[in-house]
Amino acid sequence: MSQRLVLLSFFISLFIQLMLIPMIALGQSKPAADLIITDAKVWTGDHALPHAEALAILGERIVAVGSNQEVDAWRGRQTKIIDARGKLLVPGFDDAHVHFSNGGAQLDAVQLNDVNNPEEFVRRIGERAKATPQGEWILNGDWDETKWNPPSLPTKQLIDPVTPNTPVFVSRYDGHMGLANSLALKLAGVTSATQDPPGGTIVRDAQGNPTGGLKDAAQSFVFKVIPPPSHEQRWRDIKRALAHAASVGVTSVQDMAVDYGDIAVFSELLDRQELTTRIYAAPLITQGAADQAKIGIRRAFGSPYLRIGAVKAFADGSLGSRTAYFFEPFLDQPNNRGLLSDEMHPISAMRGRMMRADAAGIQICTHAIGDAAISTILDLYTEIEKAHGDADRRFRIEHAQHMAAKDFDRFARLHVIASVQPYHAIDDGRWAEGRIGHDRASRTYAFRTFLNHGVRLAFGTDWDVAPLNPMLGLYAAVIRATLDGKNPNGWFPEQKLTITEAVEAYTMGSAYAEFQEMEKGSITTGKLADLVILSDDIFTIDPIKIRDVRVLTTIVGGKVVWERSKSAAGGRD
Ligand SMILES: [Zn+2]
């Protein structure tokens, strides 16, 4: 054999061996799945493969979706199997707007939301005062005076007798107003001589004396003197919030106006592998934008469990506190058309902050409720786009509650995401029309109109303002029956969504709103294994029953973080 032939056969055999190595490697080392879920009714949210029976998970990701038989190929000796027994399996819910540690704190706080008379209000605060250590405040509460008969704003005179030595600042459920007792007002230095701050109101009696009610920016008189929660308190609140989120199938949250102290706790929990809900944290634009820009943090920076790079701005107040900013006055207060927030005084200051945030690549999420507030923010977003050019910046408007007819097109053209909370529709729908009239109410929580204009929706709750349970939000979006039972066929029923549209807004819609649509939001091979098994098929049951559907199992990153059967005895939800 010539030398040349020897060389040639050597290269041919080398070539064959090189070809074989990867094939052998594939055949021998195809890894077995860590977890397989079989016999499920899988709703994937992925239009390429909308339905399936089973899926396989390796590590924290989905590696196969298909029939029981197809997925069974991933079974190994160590593979854990969950038999879903024909139950519905959906992508984990992603709540696009929460106040996470507040939610945890609220679960432990004095409960005032279901109170419907002043005597009960006083009784509960008095009970709590007895149990509150010297120096600690009574906070939260989530009272709602519209549930009282007749409705009337609570005053310090009501609660002073039961709280002589305990400072109290209990919040209205929407967070835009609080009630201080006399001790809290004294600590805050609020007297009849105190001027209303820009963007806020000190509620006064006929003689001009503060009644204890503080609206929007006026709340900061008291907020300034409340000691911040200790690190230990934050831990307790966030652990409580994580457990609750798992129990209701919420696998991701977008934490709006978050404190840095909370981010520190998230980070420690991440280290200890105890973060069972994925977090996208958006601190206030007034500090968060400059801080993040300084070190080059951009939108959606971080790991799948904990990301930053967004900021939360405030344009106005709320409808409930009559501080949402409208073009026309409130129907029942002809001299009041609401307030721009203190951050918007002057608007040029807000423009400057937004311009700098956008230039740094930080995502901007702006709370805007009244039609004029939304319009003003769309103006600012337009200016930013003009100044900085096209980019995939995913501007958001949080709440986007009362739309001017002229602004839907603009909303869509700017690709602004409507980050909305459907539960508010069935809650505020009880009284909204009385404050703003039929015409404006027809463009309130206008989810259908948004979709018709090609606006992307992201669903959330605003927890602790509304309950975190996604079933209530889906029910609200699909049924729109107000909580008082007065609109059984739906409050502005033309704005109802289908259950499919609602689930999409709560999964892919929210994932898109945090730049994570390639990572989660649907059950797709390669994506994070964030999954929920439900007690009933929300796509086929009578929609009125959606609110009663329970979460059976919650899985985050391939790990079971909640099981109803195991947790029922503990009653942790
Ligand atoms: Zn909020």
Image (tube, rainbow, N blue to C red):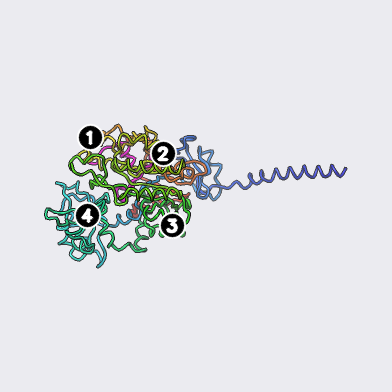
Q: Where is residue 360 in the image (x, y as percent from the top left)?
A: 45, 50
Task: Check contact, mark 2 vs mark 3: CB within 8 A.
Answer: no
Q: In this view, does 161 lie to the left or right of 6?
A: left
Task: Tell me which residue sits at (22%, 54%) in the image.
Answer: 196
- Mark 1 lies on a secondary structure that is helix
Q: Mark 2 points at which residue?
A: 415
Tag 2: residue type? His
Mark 1, residue position: 438
Q: How would you rate the neighbour count of disc 3 (Cα within 10 Å): few for under 14, some for 14-19, many for 20 or more?
A: some
Magenta span contains residue 482: yes
The amino acid beneath tag 1 is His
Dot 3: element:
loop
Q: Mark 4 — residue? A: 196
**In the rendered image, which residue does mark 3 sit on?**
274
Magenta stretch holds residue 119 = no
Which image quarter holds the N terminus? Answer: top right
The kind of residue tagged 3 is: Glu
Q: What element carries label 4?
A: loop
